[in-house]
Amino acid sequence: MKKNKGKRDLLAITLAATLLVAPVAQSLPAGHASAATASSKFKITATPFSIEGSRTSIATINKDNTTYIALRSLNNYLGLSTNYEKATQVVKIEGRGRVLQINLQNNAITLNGQLILFGPKPIGQDNTTYLPLRFLLERMGYDVSYEQARKLIEIHAIQENKLKIQSQVIGADGDGKSLLVYYPVISGYENVAVQQKINAFLKAEADRNVAAGSKQMQQAVAENNKILADNPKATVRQPSFDGHYTVTYNEKGRLSLFVDYYIYTGGAHGVTARVPYTFDLATGNVLSLKEVADGNANYVSIINSKIKAQIKSRKMLLLNPFQTIEADRDYFLNRTGVVIYFTNYEYTSFAEGMPEFVIPYTDFR
């Protein structure tokens, strides 16, 4: 399951500076924090839902064109369990092999043990806590859609592969640098050999990238030490290396995810390297782009055409003209199709992040 090409090696990334990492948004249940909006009352609306085809009405709040749902509704309508542990000040939502926790002591949201960066701010009203519907349910394994004609929110449980995904951490602080990397571990899969193969691969990949990031940080620490030796009153920022993974697809015998590694070694901001993996759960092998394109001999030109069309329709401003992807281009899967993305500075400015382009599966058939 060897990953190919040096473009995936963190040591090959040009690192210039640091990004001021925004704090995780406070996420507190009602009655416990001022983070939840309390200064103004929001209108509570009885909103029509279809849950697995059954019609019902659930109280929601609309804020900034986002639908918020009360946590207690998850118990009543979706069979998820919610619990507030007063001793630890943790709100816990469980179901579908997942545990979402909101910690009141440090205002952090975690999913299966991994910290969610930039989590949403809840609304606390009338002793009830509301969180964005899509944020909650998509992370708990549901598909959420809106039928405009009937003004109906539709919710369906995704038929996922029968496995669980938990988080392991590689972390270390000290010696003038900071390291915190999460990586996924699967469990409960019926094919134990495949499960062990994938887990060993993901652990080795995490170790490899941590080693590369640590080497970059050590060089930055040496530079900081030189600066301080020349000017003890100088201000230097600590190098850091962080990794967070996102599972994007877990259906039909395939598991797709990516890990975003963010490294800061000095300057204005750091750089994020995205490292994706798509596994065939029958063999445990990493699938190539051609394989997920159904082996279509013209997959590169099909993808190029779609990307160019989307660049035009989205009126994207590019640093360099887009011509073609590589035959072994990095990608990941989602429920809609194959996702190609531009890396930092590849075609767009840093502020644009990593623009994504979805190519529907049907385009390769």
Image (tube, grey):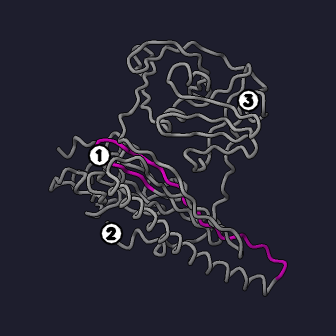
Q: Which residue is mark 1?
A: 253
Q: In terms of secondary structure, where does tag 2 sit?
A: loop
| Nearer-N-terminus badge (2/3) | 2
Q: In terms of secondary structure, where does tag 3 sit?
A: loop
Give 86 or 348, whichever is nearer the viewer.
86
| Nearer-N-terminus badge (2/1) | 2
What residue sits 66% from the left and 16% below the top? 43
Residue 35 lies, with reference to residue 280, above or below; the image says above
Q: In terms of secondary structure, where does tag 1 sit?
A: loop
Q: CA distance from mark 1 to mark 3?
A: 42 Å
Mark 2 Cα shell of 10 Å, populated few (<14), some (14-19), many (≥20) = few
Q: Which residue is mark 3?
A: 37
Direction from residue 115 to residue 361 in the image, left or right: left
Residue 316, numbered circle:
none
Q: Is residue 235 magenta?
A: yes
| Quadrant (top left, top right, bottom left, bottom right) of the N terminus | bottom left
Write down the region rendered in magenta.
Answer: 232-258
Name the amino acid, label 1. Answer: Gly
Q: Which residue is mark 2?
A: 2
Observer-side mark, 2 or 1, equals 1
Direction from residue 268 to residue 56 in the image, left or right: left
| Nearer-N-terminus badge (1/3) | 3
Residue 234 location (% of width, % of height): 80, 77
Give 184 or 324, whichever is nearer the viewer.
184
Name the amino acid, label 2. Answer: Lys
Residue 102 location (% of width, % of height): 66, 39
